[in-house]
Image (tube, rainbow, N blue to C red):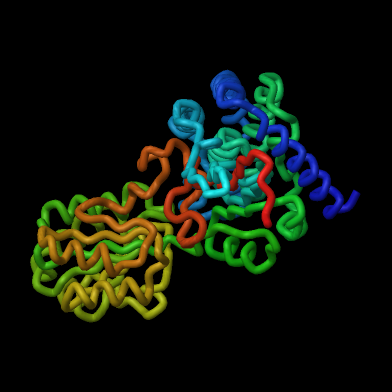
Amino acid sequence: MGLREDMLTLAREASQGARLMATKSSEEKNSFLAAMADALDAHKDKIYAANKIDMAAGREQGLSPALLDRLELTEKRVQGMIQGIREVIALPDPVGEGLGEHGLENGLRIQKRRVPIGVIGIIYESRPNVTADAAALCLKTSNAVILRGGKEALHSNGAIYEILKKAGEAAGMPGGALQFVKTIDREAVRELVQLEDYLHLIIPRGGEGLIRAITAMSRVPVIKHSKGLCHTYVDKDADLAMALNICLNAKVQRPGVCNAMETLLIHQDVAEDFLPKVSESLRDKKVELRGDAAACSLDSSLILATDEDWDTEYLDLILSIRIVKSLEDAIDHIDRYGSNHSDAIISQDRKAQDAFINQVDSAAVYVNASTRFTDGGQFGMGAEIGISTDKLHARGPMGLKELTTYKYVVLGEGQIRE
C-alpha cells in the first residue's frame, strides 16, 4: 500500500476506536490507563535503551543542546510520564458532564452535554514523553488518537507506544483507539492531515516551522501555538530581589521550552540598579546577553541586539534585554513581538498589574511569578496535550476538558413542530 492508503487505514481504525471508546465508562478507561502506567514502570529498561539509540543519532547529526535536552529521557522524566498517567486517572472524567438544561413551553427539555471530540491527530517533535501524555489525555476523554512523532525520537516513541498499546488492549481498550505513524516520511503527515472525513482535530507540538507547515497543509482544524516568545517586564515599582529570582528561573531553569523567557523588559527608572545584577547572575549561568542601545550603555558586555532578536524564540541560553520608558512601552513591545503565549509583570503597583493583565493578550499572564508555570501539570490539569495560543476552542494549557466538545440532547414526549 502507498502512504495515502496506510494513513486511511490508520484513520479508519481510529474512527472505529473512537466510536467504541464513547461506550466506555470512566472506570473502564481508568483501568486501561492504570495498566499502561504499570507497563511503563515495568519496562523502563526498554525505554532507556531505545532513547540511547535516538540520543546517539542526535549527537551524530549535530542536534543542538536544546533539542537534545528535549529528546533525552532521564529517570526523572520517565517517572514523570508514569506519574502523569496516574494523575490523569485521578482527575474527574469530563465526558457526560451536564453543561446546562432548560425546558420549553412545548415540554421539550434541552440538555447540553460534554462529549469527546472523536479522532485527534498529535504531530510532535523531540519530546518522547508526549507519546504517553497524549495517549492518557485522549483516552481518558474517550477520544481515539493517532500519534506521529519526529524522526529524531523514532525509537523512543515507538518503544513507549508499543508498551502502552499492548497494556491497554490487554485491559480491554479498543484496538483502534491508539494509533502510531511508524514511517518517518514527511508525506505521511501531509496525507494524514488531509483526512477530514475521519480526523476531527490536529494538535501540532514542536517548532514554529512544523506548526506553520501543518496549519498550511491541513484540511482538519488545527489548534496551535506558532512559538513561545515570552517576556518578563520589570516595572519601576518592582521588588528587585524578587525580580532577580523570577528572571533567573524564567530563563535558565529549562531554556529549551516554550514557556522560557526570551526577552527581558526593564523600566528605565530601575535599570541602572537592576540590569548589572541580573546581567551578572545570568552570565554566571552561561547566558549570552543581547541588549538595545540603552541596555548596552549600562552594561558594555551586552551584544547589541538587532531587530531580528526581538522576534526570535531562542530556546537556548540567549536573552534579549530592552530598557523601556514606561509600562505602556513594555505593553507595546509585547503586542508587537509577542506570541500570545506567556508574559509576566514584576510590580508591587496594583494599577500597573491590572493594566498589564487587561492589555496583554496572551494565553497566560503572570503577576510576580515565572512564566515557567505555563504547563498543564503545574496548572493542576495533570499531563497536558499542549499549549494553545489560539482563542478557539481552547487557549493555554490543554487538559481534559479542552479535549471535549458538546452536543445538545433534546428530550421529548412526542412533540412535533407545527
In the displayed structure, 277 sits above or below 99; it is below
Q: What residue is rendered at 70% in x and 51% in y? A: 199
The image shows a total of numbered marks equal to 0
Q: What residue is rendered at 23% in x and 77% in y? A: 329
x and y percentages locating residue 174 in the rendered image: 72, 29
In the displayed structure, 371 sits above or below 73; it is below
Q: Nearer the viewer, residue 195 or 327?
A: 195
x and y percentages locating residue 20 in the rendered image: 72, 33
Q: What residue is rendered at 10% in x and 62% in y? A: 349
* For residue 351, side relative to residue 265 (left or right): left
Quarter of the rendering containing residue 4: bottom right
Residue projecting furthest to the right: 1
In the displayed structure, 69 sits above or below 306; it is above
Q: What residue is rendered at 57% in x and 37% in y? A: 141
Question: Can residue 168 be seen at all in this image of the molecule?
Answer: yes
Quarter of the rendering containing residue 111: top right
Quarter of the rendering containing residue 62: bottom right
x and y percentages locating residue 210 in the rendered image: 60, 61
Question: Can residue 116 be seen at all in this image of the molecule?
Answer: no
Q: Nearer the viewer, residue 283 or 353?
A: 353
**Position of the C terminus by quadrant:** bottom right
x and y percentages locating residue 79 in the rendered image: 47, 28
Q: Nearer the viewer, residue 310 or 329?
A: 329
